[in-house]
Image (cartoon, rainbow, N blue to C red):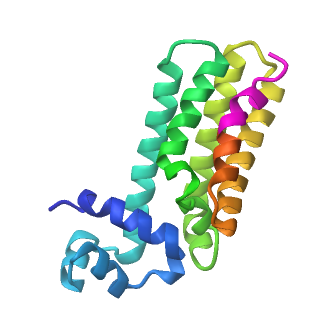
Amino acid sequence: MSKQTHVPFLLDLFRQLGYDGVTLSKISQVTGLGKASLYHHFPGGKDEMVETVLIAMEQGLEQIALETFRSEGDALTRLQTMCDRISIAYDDGRKPCLLAALMLGSAKAVFQERVRSLLKLWMDAIATILIEDGMDEGLARQRGEDGIIAIQGALILAQGLGDAAPFQRVIEQLPKQLCQDL
């Protein structure tokens, strides 16, 4: 079994418990691997596990962005496609965001640069779509930030309330809000 096999389990675990809340026992429990097997697959320990999950997330985000760029239609249609895929990735708002979890506790110092890179990639993807449809670059970059703020805020609210409806509403309304003034 490759270490990629364990990425979905690790992603869910780190999403739910954060970096500091995840122990080797919990990882062993969800992956079914003993400590020796864990270190065989991840010699760098927990940091390598998170790094592997972040690489998978980055690849997923790049795939979402690339598919969105390649999709047909105007900015509104393309951003709706992106939001639909984001909604699937977060199970319609039922799953918390790993990036937010990694900005808490001791993980922040270790992973902040990777998280920053992923957020920038996401913001740039939104801005590029808006610029391609004729929006001023400065406004498009601001809307890219606004989009991430809306998505991340809705994820936090959905988790805090135990109700995914706010996230679903934001995902539904966001493409139109981002495309205002086009």
Q: Name the residue located 36 percent from the left edge and 83 percent from the top edge.
A: 26
Q: Judge whether 9 appears above or below 58 on screen.
A: below
Question: Looking at the rendering, which quadrant does residue 145 occupy?
Answer: top right
Q: Name the residue located 70 percent from the left edge and 51 percent from the top edge.
A: 166
The spot of residue 5 in percent (x, y) is: 24, 59
Q: Nearer the viewer, residue 139 or 164?
A: 164
Q: Nearer the viewer, residue 72 or 161?
A: 161
Q: Nearer the viewer, residue 87 or 111?
A: 87
Q: Nearer the viewer, residue 5 or 170?
A: 170
Q: Name the residue located 71 percent from the left edge and 19 percent from the top edge.
A: 131
Q: Judge whether 122 appears above or below 152 on screen.
A: above
In terms of secondary structure, what is the magenta stretch mainly? Answer: helix
The spot of residue 119 in percent (x, y) is: 62, 48
Q: Name the residue located 41 percent from the left edge and 52 percent from the top edge.
A: 55
**Left or right placement of residue 130 versus residue 28 in this view:** right
Quarter of the image with the C terminus is: top right
Question: Looking at the rendering, which quadrant does residue 51 occupy?
Answer: bottom left
The spot of residue 118 in percent (x, y) is: 56, 48
Residue 178 painted magenta = yes
Quarter of the image with the N terminus is: bottom left
The spot of residue 36 in percent (x, y) is: 19, 83
**Left or right placement of residue 136 versus residue 161 in this view:** right
